[in-house]
Image (cartoon, rainbow, N blue to C red):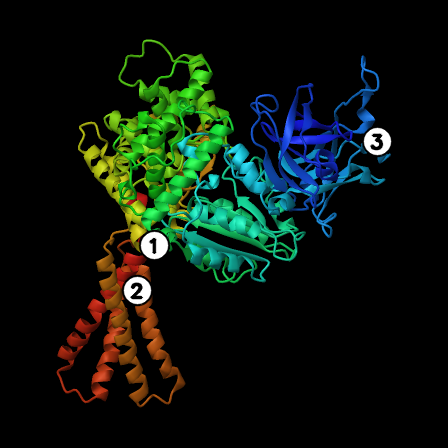
Amino acid sequence: MEVRTVEVVNPRVPMFGSGALVAPGLVLTAYHVACPGGDREPVTVRDKIGRAAEATVAWADADLDAVLLQTHRAVLGAGLPVARWGELTCDYPDARPVCSMTGFPRAMRRPHPTLPDAFVGELLAVDGNIKPATGSRRGYYGFELINTSLESAELWQGMSGAGAFCNDRLVGVATFASDFQHGGLLHLMPAARLFASPGFTDTVTAVTGMTPQLQPADLRVLLDDVPDPQLSTSYLLKAQSAVVPLTGMTTQLDALEAWCRTSRPTDVTAVTGIAGIGKTRLITELMRRLGQPRPGNPTARGWTGGFLADTPLQQPPHYRMLATSKYPLLLAVDYAETRRDQVDQVLAVLAARSTSQPLRVLLLARGRDTWWPSLRRAHQGSTVMSTGATIDVDPADALAETTTEDAFDTAKHAFTQRIHALQSAGLGDDWAASPLRPDSPGPMFTAAAKPADDTVISLHMAALADVLATLNDDFARYDNPMDVLIAHEVSYWRRIVEARGEYFDENLMRTLVAVQAVTGAKKLNNAQAAVTAGFDVHHSGFPDAAPNDRRLLAAYEDILTAAYPSVDGAHWGSMGPDLLGTALVAEVEEKSGGQFIERLLPHPYLEEDQQHRALTVLARAVPNQPALAAGAARAVAAAPDTLLPLAARTVTAELDPEIARPWLLSLQDALAEQAQQPDADPDTCAWAAELVSASLTHLETGFDDYFNSPDWVPPHKPETEDDLEDDFDEPVDEEPDWDPDDDADAEEDRESAGGEDDPAEPSVDPAGTTEAPAPRPTVIVRTITSRAARTALTAAAIVHLGFVAFVTGSVAYFSDYSSEPTFWGLPPLIISAHLFIGSFYGHRKLPIAFATLAAPPLFLFMTVAVGMMFSDLHGVDVNPVLMALVWAGAFSPGMLALTYAFRAWFGQIRFTDDT
C-alpha cells in the first residue's frame, strides 16, 4: 500500500524511518523512530512525492514500540479512506494471502543531487507471508520475505515503522528492522496488541470518526467489511458503525460469551428476535469483548471474527479456509433465514475440522419457525452443533437496565460526539460550519416521539433526529423524526451529486435510492438494470419521446455506488438500517399513487435474483409498512407467471409465519381482484389461487421442508397461447423416407394383437422414435387450513386410536385365546390397519376402483368383529345386528377423523391435471 507510506524524520537525533497513513493526517509508526529516548517533540513526516508536514504525538506506547502521529490532513493523505485493521487467523496453504510492506530502508537512500551530506529516500516494496503461529510466544508476527536481495540487517534500517498490509488490512507495524534475520524474517507488532493498549482505539475514533474494528485479514474474501465513515443518517444508525454504546442485553451477552468459551471446538446457535431490537449490535459488542486479551496475559491472542458476506469477494468462496483457523474465531450470519444454502455449505466444511481451536457460528434471524427446526434436526448432536439452543432477544431487553429517557440521552450524546468527530475528520455537511450546540435547551424530539414499536432502533432514530434538528435549523421545521432523518440523507446525496457536476433532482434520487434498497445489485449489469428500471418507473406515464440518456444512467449508477458502497463482493450496498430504507420506499410508493412497486417488480430488465431480494425486503417490511405489502401483492397478481412461484417460495420458506401470513393474505385478495378483470385468464387465476392456498396451508402446518426441498416445484401452470406458438416455432427434424410396406406390416401386427392401439403403450412418432408417456406432475393441496379444525381432528383421531387399542387389548387379555401368543398380534394389527387407512387415504387422492372402495369397509368390519367379541366377553345381551351397528357407529367417525387429521397435517397429493 505505497499510497499510505510516509517517511518519518527526527532531525534532532537524527533518526529516520517509515510510517503508514491510517487516515488523512494520522500516521502509525515505530516509537523509537518518532520518540527516541522518550523525546515527544514534533517530527517531520514526508509522503512519497515529497510533501512534508510537522506531526505531533497523539498516542504512544513505548512497550509496544508504536506511536500515532497527527498532522495536517489537507497536506498528507487528503481523500484517503480510513484504513481497515486486521489480523492473521487461518493457515490455509491453498489460499495463503500475500502480504506487502512499503518503506524507506537505508539500502534505497541516495545522495541529494544538490545538497551535500544530504540523502533522498526511495521506496522499497516487499512481499511476504505471515503465518499466524510464527512468533506467537513473544506476541509478534514473523514477516517471511519473498525473493529479497537485501541480506544485511544494516540495509533494512529505515523500514522500522512501516505498515504491513494483508488483503488491504493493516495487520501490523515493523518495529526494529535491524533485527532482520538471514533467511528473510522481519518482526511485526500485531495490530491486535495495539488495540489492547489503553487509548489506542479512542484516539483513532476521535481522529477518524470511525470506531476501529479488528477483522480476520485472511478471511476478508469471505466476510463483510465495516462501513466507511460518512456524515449520513445511514452510517450513523447502522449497527456495524457502533456509534451508540450497547445498553441492556447483559443476560444475552453473558450467555453468548459463556457459550463461546465452552470446550467444544465447534458449535452453532441462533439469535432470534424482531427487526430493530439490537441483534447485530449485540454481536458486534460480543466480538469486541471477546477480542480483548485475557487479564494477566497481554500477548495472548483474543478472538476475532466477522459477519459472513452474502456475496463473498471470492467466487467460488473457499469456505475450507475456515476449517484451518489457528485462533478462536466467531462467525456471524445475518438474515440466516434467507441464507440456508450458504449456512449448509459452511457447516459441511466445519464438520471436517481437525483443529481444537474454538470456532462459533451465530445465526441471526427474525424468526425461527420456518428454518431453524430442520437445520437443528440435521446437525443437532453432531460435531458442529451441540444442543442447538437459541438465544431470544425481546424488544424490552435493550432497555432492561436503564430508563427510556436515560437511553435516549445516551444516544443523543453518542451521536453528537460522533458527528463532531466526523466533521473534524473533514467529512463535512451543508451545515459543517455551524457551531455544535450539544447543550441547547429543549429537545426537538423527546423519547416519547419514537414509534410505538418499542424497538431500540426507533429510540435511536428519534435521538438522532433530535440532534440533527438541534444542530441544523433547516431540520427543525419537520414534525416527524423520520422526515428529519430522510432530509439529512437527502443533503448527503446532494453533496455526492453536485461533486460530480450533475444536476440534483431530489425526486429522481429518492426513486433511485428506493430501487437500490429494494433490488440490490451483485454485479455491474445488475446495477445498470436497476438504474434503468428506476428511470422507467420514475418517468412512467410520460410518452416515450426519446430513449434514456445513457450518459445520465451511467452517472447515476456511479452516484448510487458512491453513496452506498458495498461491504462485500456485491456491486453496491443500500440505504440502511431496514426501518429507514423501507420508510423511504414507502414514501416513494405513496407519492407514486401506489404504482412504484407494481411497476418495478415485473420490470423486464431485473434478474430473478433482484426480484427475489425485492420480495424478501418488501415482505420483511410488512409489520412497519403494510402499504408495501399491498403494492407487492398487486405486482405479483398482475404478473403471476413470472413472480408468483418466486413469491410463494420466498415468503413461505424464508419468513416467519407472523410476517408471511399477512403478506400472503393480501396477495390472495389481490389475485381475487385480478380474477374479476375482463381480460383475466381463468386457468391462470385458478392456478395462482391454488398456489397461494398451498402456501398458506404450509404456514399453518409448519412443515418447512416442503418449500425448502430442492425438488419443490410450483403447481402446474396452464399453457398459454404464446407457449403453444413457441412449440410450433421449434425446428422439426426432416421426415424420413416413407415405405408403404411398413404401414402394412404394422396394420397386420395390430390386427393380430386385437385391433386398436393400446393407449398404455409407448407411442411411436413418424420418425420411428419411441416416446415414453410423460409422468403426470403432482402437487400437495392443503384443503384444511384452519388451525382449530386441525386441532379438533387430531384430538378426535388420538381418542379413536386409544379406544381401538382399549377394545382390542381387552379382547386379547380376557379372551379364552389369551394364552396364544399369536392372538396378541390382534391389537397392533387392527391399529396398524386404521393408521394405514388414515395415512393412505388422507394423503392421496385415489382413483375410483374396487380395491380403493373395498379396503375401508373391510378394515371397519374387522374392527366391528373385535367389538362384538368385547360385548360377548362382558355379557352384553343385545340383538347382534343392532350391536354391530352400534360398534360401526362408534368406530366410523374416528376412522374418518383419523383420515382427515392426516390430510390436515400433510395435505393431499393430487395430479395437477386433476386439480
* Residue name at image x 43 percent, y 53 percent: 271
Q: Is residue 8 above or below residue 553?
A: below
Instruction: Give residue 445's position: percent from left, percent from top.
Output: 29, 37
Q: Quadrant of the C terminus?
A: top left
Amino acid type at image mark 3: Leu
Distance from label 3 to label 2 (Cα)?
A: 88 Å
Looking at the rendered image, the disc whose residue lies closer to the viewer, 2 or 1, is 1
> Please, what secondary structure does the residue beneath circle 1 have?
loop
Give the residue at mark 1: 702
Distance from label 2 to label 1 (Cα)?
A: 24 Å
309 or 241: which is nearer to us? Answer: 241
Give the residue at mark 2: 837
**Can residue 316 be seen at all in this image of the molecule?**
yes
Are there few (<14), some (14-19), or many (20+) residues within 10 Å of tag 3?
some
> Please, what secondary structure does the residue beneath circle 3 have?
helix
| Disc 1 to disc 3: CB gap under 8 Å | no
458 or 818: which is nearer to us? Answer: 458
Instruction: Give residue 251's position: percent from left, percent from top.
Output: 43, 58
10 or 745: which is nearer to us? Answer: 10
| Direction from residue 108 to residue 466 in the image, left or right | left
* Residue name at image x 64 percent, y 57 percent: 296
Distance from label 1 to label 3 (Cα)?
A: 70 Å
Give the residue at mark 3: 155
